[in-house]
Image (spheres, rainbow, N blue to C red):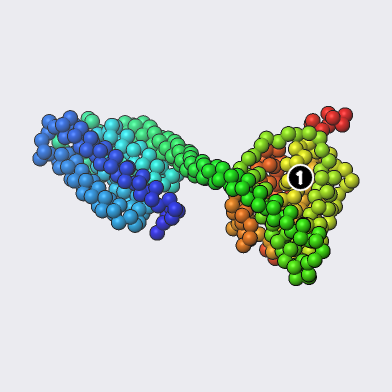
Amino acid sequence: MKLGIRDGAESSFAVRFAWLTGLRLIVLTIVLIVMTTIYLGGIGTRADSSRIAMLTFAVAFALTGVYAAVLRIGKGLPLLAYGQMLVDQVAWSMIVYVSGGATSGATSLYGFTCLCGAILLGLRGALIGLIAGASSYALICMLLVQGYLKPPPDQPLEAYATDWSEAAFPLVLNLLAMCVVALLGSYLAERLRETGGRLVVATARAEQAERLAALGRLAAGLAHEIRNPLGSIVASIELLRTGGSLGAEDEALCAIIERETTRLNELVTDMLDVSRPRAPSKAPMDLAATARDVVVLAGKSGRGRDVPLRFVGPNSLPIVGDMAQVRQVVWNLLRNAIQASSAGAEVVVRVEADAGGAVVLAVEDRGVGIPPEARERLFDAFFTTRSQGMGIGLAVVKRILDDHGFAIEVESEPGKGTTFRVRIPASKELELASG
């Protein structure tokens, strides 16, 4: 029985439970010392109050050993936490009974259990502690006032409120204090839990960024070394083709070499883009003309020859951005769509302005689509859903768009295709330039 505790947080819950069990043991010890030396010291250990208090503390300390044993096993901890809160509130009620009833100063111990419940189980734990504490405290007060429960014979009768005119005020005040402690404790515990979760995520991202930075430096060094032999290979293939002495089989082999070197050069370019990000140099540019040029270029190289490409949009559509980086975004999105498409499946690049003045760039394919579980990590570096590729192109796209302040949306349906939609807000700089 998990009682709402997630499996991934069980270890954190166990640590909190262990710390609070230790703190509970310290509080019990302090209360025991105060009770025996100050409050009950003058009446002796044989008095009824002393016997009730000692029995209560003995049971509480014994249960602490049980809690420690269950903690070592590590199972059923949330259920044990609820049980601990109920037992503690009953124990505090016994201490309240022997120390003055409604007017006892020990009522503050109810709030301690409510705080422990909030830290362990959030609002639910705080409410359980509040209900258990308020119910047991109100029951003690009612029994004393109605005469069903007599004060301990060794305690002065005037120390107890035995009618409602005396008990009402401390009862209401203490119940109100319990409510405030429970609600405030649950609120603060939830805020601390959220902050701790964000801190863990931030730490993980920082560690990942350090690893990616080291990998980026390595990739940049390798990319420079790889490009030199790539250039030599491409030049050699061109020389062989211009010789005119190649047969059909040799021509096919040269085409394979050319295609693979082009793919390798694209990977090298992506590595360099990831390892050497630069701030965009924004200026007015024509998005429609840029997208159209990329579509024409992609249709003449690689798999673009096998996939029909179509541009839809006006002749001109101005935006403000870094032309080279925006061109890289269109190229990467279009290349991604081509790679996801089968031969003959059309890819559409669409550019349009919406009613609010924003510009939308959409790249649509009819490929296999993106699985729902992969969409959250789609723009992470080195994450890819294909057997080929390194998962760098979309990471470069996301970084460039973030630097520009542009948003990107992904719509995908398995088996029917994917649409990447870049939303470019209206630019005041462009309005001033056109005005």
* Residue located 63% across and 60% down the image: 388
- Indicate whether 381 appears above or below 435: below
Q: Is residue 146 visible?
A: no
User: Which residue shows up at 78% across the image and 70% down it?
Assistant: 248
Image check: 82 left or right of 308? left
Helix, strand or loop for disc 1 = helix
| Residue drawn at the location 70% of the way across and 51% of the way down | 231
Q: Quadrant of the C terminus?
A: top right
From the viewer's side, name the closer residue of 354 and 91. 354
Q: Quadrant of residue 357?
A: top right
Query: Is residue 291 in view?
Result: yes
Taking the image as shown, residue 199 lies to the left or right of residue 344, namely left
Q: Where residue 255 sits: x, y (%)? A: 75, 63
Which quadrant: the N terminus? bottom left
Residue denoted by label 1: 327
- Residue 362: x and y in percent read 77, 51
- In the image, residue 76 sits, relative to residue 39, either above or below, namely below
Task: Look at 83% across and 53% down and name the residue there.
Answer: 296
Residue at the farthest right position: 315
Q: Nearer the viewer, residue 366 or 293?
A: 293
Using a 10 Å C-alpha cutoff, classify the residue at mark 1 as few (fewer than 14 neighbours), some (14 to 19) or many (20 or more).
some
State the count of labels. Answer: 1
Pick whichever, 309 or 132, lies toward us: 309
Left or right: 24 with respect to 337? left
Across and down, in percent, residue 303 comes to 75, 61
* Amino acid identity at mark 1: Arg
Residue 167 in the figure: left or right of residue 392: left
Quarter-of-image position of residue 39: top left
Pinpoint residue 94: horizontal percent, then vertical percent: 24, 42
